[in-house]
Amino acid sequence: MSQCPLCNGSKKGRVESVNVKDLIDLYKNMTGYDSSHLFGDRLTLEDCGVCGLRFFSPMVAGDEGFYNSLQKYDWYYVAEKPEYFMAKEHVSAGDVVLDVGCGRGAFSRFVEEKNGKFLGLDFSQNAKNIAASNGITVVVGSIQEYSDEHPETVDVVTSFQVAEHVSDVKGFIEGKLKVLKVGGKMIIAVPSESSFLSQVTNGILNMPPHHITRWSDEVFDFIAKKYDLSLLSVEHEKLQDVHARWYLSTLFQNSLTSPKTLDTSIKRKLVSRASGLFSRIVEPALTPSMRPNGHTVLAVFQKS
């Protein structure tokens, strides 16, 4: 087993091979972008038997061209996410909030509603320029670099749908903690592996070079213990309307064939088509009380 990017452990859990050529082809069909130069000839999804993190090996991260191919879609950046509403409840008046991987600074509005001060951090110069045009301050760089220069300077440090893209998970977490004042809060929102997502087949946006790690609730418990943090809450959004058919389709497919990370077989294609029809028919009957954990989980830690 490869070394875990969070705990450096090598205690093997489940290992599943992923067909690299099929994955490249699926991304190319979806986005038009050829990501073959990013991959080698092998790819596996591994479970760490120590901390519970699931990660792809090797850790193939997207480049600028790959992310530009996704940013053309309106759904890729949205101004309001359920996790923003969850997170703002942990911001108090006067708090300095650093949002790591802030993009265009969408969370700034929620910080301002709580009378806090927003700072953004992102790798993208384009994101900084767009944010600046809206009066939002964004610094270009990594959290590791920023925390070295500004240790213990913020009251709340957030990241929304960012950690799953990061190859140096340990450095990312430790950078967030270093920039945080004693008593401050670290907030992490990621796609939840403790939801139906763990049973999805061919969910390519949950695979490299987009997502390179997968986070269950078990991982948050490990982080709290490892870094002597108080885990204040783990909050799951309920299944959102936009994901309802995806969830129902997953249920239908898994009733007929076992879930796999990637499966381009004829049988899977036929089952997938049938599941699309099933989900459209059944969706109106999916009442609020029937909805399970949705796409995103938000964990809130406090630094001792």
Image (cartoon, rainbow, N blue to C red):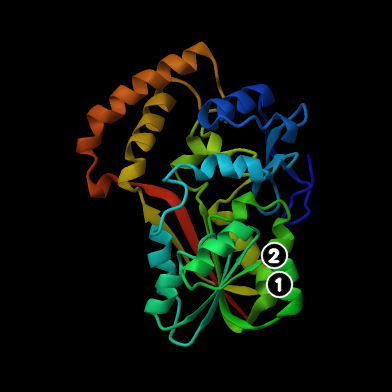
Q: Identify the residue position indicated by label 2 in the image.
A: 141
| Visible residue check, residue 102 | no
Provide residue 238's location: percent of width, then percent of height.
35, 52
Badge 1, how many Cα within 10 Å: few under 14, some, many 20+? some
Q: CA distance from mark 1 to mark 2?
A: 7 Å
For badge 2, the amino acid type reads: Gly
Provide residue 192's location: percent of width, then percent of height.
50, 50
| Visible residue check, residue 256 | yes
Provide residue 68's location: percent of width, then percent of height.
58, 44
Picture quadrant of residue 143:
bottom right
Quarter of the image where the C terminus is located:
bottom right
Q: Residue at x 58, y 27 (%)?
A: 28
Instruction: Return the residue nearer the eye: 203 or 52.
Output: 203
The label shown at residue 146 is 1
Q: Residue at x 45, y 78 (%)?
A: 91
| Secondary structure beneath label 2 | loop
Badge 2, how many Cα within 10 Å: few under 14, some, many 20+? some
| Secondary structure beneath label 1 | helix
Q: Height in image: 82 above or below 288? A: below
Provide residue 16's location: percent of width, then percent of height.
66, 31
The disc, 1 or 2, on the residue closer to the chain's N-terminal end is 2
The label shown at residue 160 is none
Q: Residue furthest top?
A: 266
For badge 1, the amino acid type reads: Tyr
Picture quadrant of residue 96:
bottom right
Quarter of the image where the N terminus is located:
top right
Instruction: Return the residue nearer the eye: 214 or 254.
Output: 214
